[in-house]
Amino acid sequence: MTPPIPDRPPGRIHTFDALRYPNYRLWFWGQLVSVFGTWMQHTAQGFLIFELTRSPAFLGYVGFAAGLPAWMFMLYAGLVADRMPRRRLLILTQSAMLVLAFLSAALVFSAAVRPWHILVLAFGFGAANAFDAPARQAFVHELVGPEDLTNAIALNSAMFNTSAAVGPAVGGITYALFGPAWCFVINGLSFLAVIGALAAMKLAPLVPPPRSVSRLADVKEGLSYVRRHDLISTLILSIIVISLFGNSFITILPAWAVKILGGGAAVNGFLTAARGLGALAAALFIASLGGFHFRGRLLVLGALTFPVLLILFALARTTLLAYLTIFASGFALILVYNLANAAVQSLAAPHLRGRVMAIYSMAFFGFMPLGSFLIGQLAAHLGERAALIACSSVVLIYMLGMTLARPSVRRLA
């Protein structure tokens, strides 16, 4: 139960409403620092593996290794998120990622790092994230009131994408000046912020749910619920298509920076940062709308423009045009991700929310590695540009079909 919060003064801007809640403020600032470090690690890790292998296909292997644990653990992790205190689970997962970040740094400092090490570490981060993501998604309900849920999700995205805008740029510069190990050290230290924030929160004690006969039956209950709920299943299928054929293009950005744009680690960081800035702008835009009632139309707008913008990015011949189009694609993508996330959380039955959000998280984290593998292979055989155009075209065709076949999505309030 979240503490009561005073009514909003009339006429005020609603962009930061969720920050009125003390627990949410702790969460927001702790996560901001932690995700900043995570983006530094992600940027440095991608460029390091490309330097070691010079292979866009191997970039896909790393993305696949990072996402494989979602298939192995995430449905069970959703049940865990419904059964144990989410704060305790999040402290455990963040601590595990802290250890992995320092292990990454130690391997590079000692000059012992090999491509297979990065594959193993990517799998480890993916395993920790498989348990972290459902708990993190459902945890927002413990921090804010229901009327501020969409605002909190938008601010979460703004926090994530502020880090996504700054972290990769700082990571690219740090990599170029000092090497990847220091990016990994900073990431390890950043986890201390969110662990401290979680420990400082004042939360109501968890009321244990009734014990069930079978954990497998509980997992199946969540799957059956999503399958029967037409709107939730449509939204999750849309996230699957975007993760598989659209958002996975970030896996080949290191190769894009070098082979298409003729740059290096800094250009790779700036591309990721430009995408993050676009996503940040979209998140703040959504948060500023307050209690608006046209979420479905905005979601469909983002779903249709995102693949078109990716095709324009693929056709860009200059670095400036690449930055502009990837910025715009980041904006469109967050319209889909944020509004779909808020809709699924609002529509889900409270006692199944952890399991529903595990399925939603699996749509993102589970299918993106398959997409990473796919686009890595296509890039190796057809070239980066042709691979991105082909994958983006699939997203565009699906989104046109979804818009025509499921008008209920457009009517989401």
Image: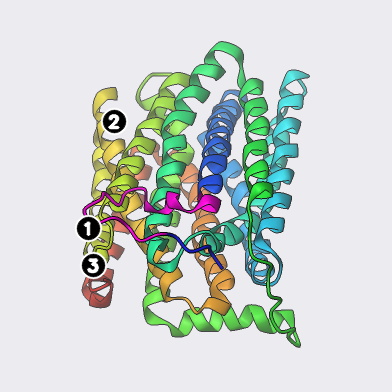
Please state which of the two labelled residues, at mark 1 or mark 3, is closer to the viewer: 3
Q: Compare residues 203 and 373 and report the one nearer the observer.
A: 203
Badge number at residue 301: 1
Q: Quadrant of residue 378?
A: top left
Q: Compare residues 248 and 295 and report the one nearer the observer.
A: 295
In the depicted structure, whether residue 315 falls above or below residue 124: above
Viewed as shown, does residue 389 lie left or right of 49?
left
- Secondary structure under the numbered disc 1 in the rendered image: helix
Which residue in the protein does label 3 denote? Answer: 293
Identify the residue at the far top of this view: 177
Please state which of the two labelled residues, at mark 2 or mark 3, is closer to the viewer: 3
Q: Earlier in the sequence, mark 2 or mark 3?
A: 3
Q: Image point 57% across, 57% down: which residue?
A: 136
**Residue 104 coordinates in the image, percent (x, y):** 71, 31
CA separation, marks 2 and 1? Answer: 21 Å
**Residue 192 coordinates in the image, percent (x, y):** 67, 37
The residues colored magenta run 6-24
Q: Earlier in the sequence, mark 1 or mark 3?
A: 3
Please state which of the two labelled residues, at mark 2 or mark 1, is closer to the viewer: 1
Badge 1: residue crowd in 10 Å (few <14, some 14–19, many ≥20): some
